[in-house]
Amino acid sequence: MSPDPVMDIRWQLIEYIQSAVMSAKGNVVSFNLKQIKKALGMNSKAEETALKLALGALADLGLLQRVPGKKLRYFLRRGSPLWNALELGCTDLLTILMDRHPRKYKLLRSHSSPKK
């Protein structure tokens, strides 16, 4: 049985955010999609879509702050629930939360519906 590539991308994203939290010198960590793609070596549109879904799920759950603009940025503050979970190493919980997010299922259903 082959591993789920979307789940793999979620794990890579969580590991990226966790490393940013662990190496943070201040009280805030910020990043955008381009930085994450470059750091993780992702080039395909499918990987980008999976990253957007995962980041969107974390933002919709209130675990990340989304700051709109020319380039959408995400902020994470020290002491926030996500920061504390990453410091404690609770990465399994975060992937479960992203996996069960209702927005993901809505998007997947809309992409899997047959074209007329």
Image (cartoon, rainbow, N blue to C red):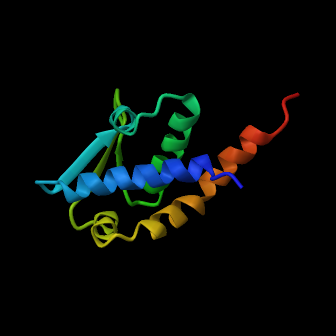
Is residue 25 or residue 69 the one in the foreground?
25
In the image: residue 95, left or right of residue 6: left
User: Residue 77: image x %, image y %?
Assistant: 23, 58
**Residue at 46% across, 60% down:** 61
- All told, the count of numbered labels is 0
Is residue 46 or residue 54 the one in the foreground?
46
- Residue 59 in view of the camera: no
**Residue at 39% across, 71% down:** 90
Q: Quadrant of the C terminus?
A: top right
Q: Which residue sits furthest right?
A: 116
**Residue at 34% across, 64% down:** 82
Q: Is residue 50 above or below residue 62?
A: above
Q: Which residue sits furthest front?
A: 1
- Residue 37 in view of the camera: yes
User: Residue 97: image x %, image y %?
Assistant: 52, 65
User: Residue 110: image x %, image y %?
Assistant: 73, 41
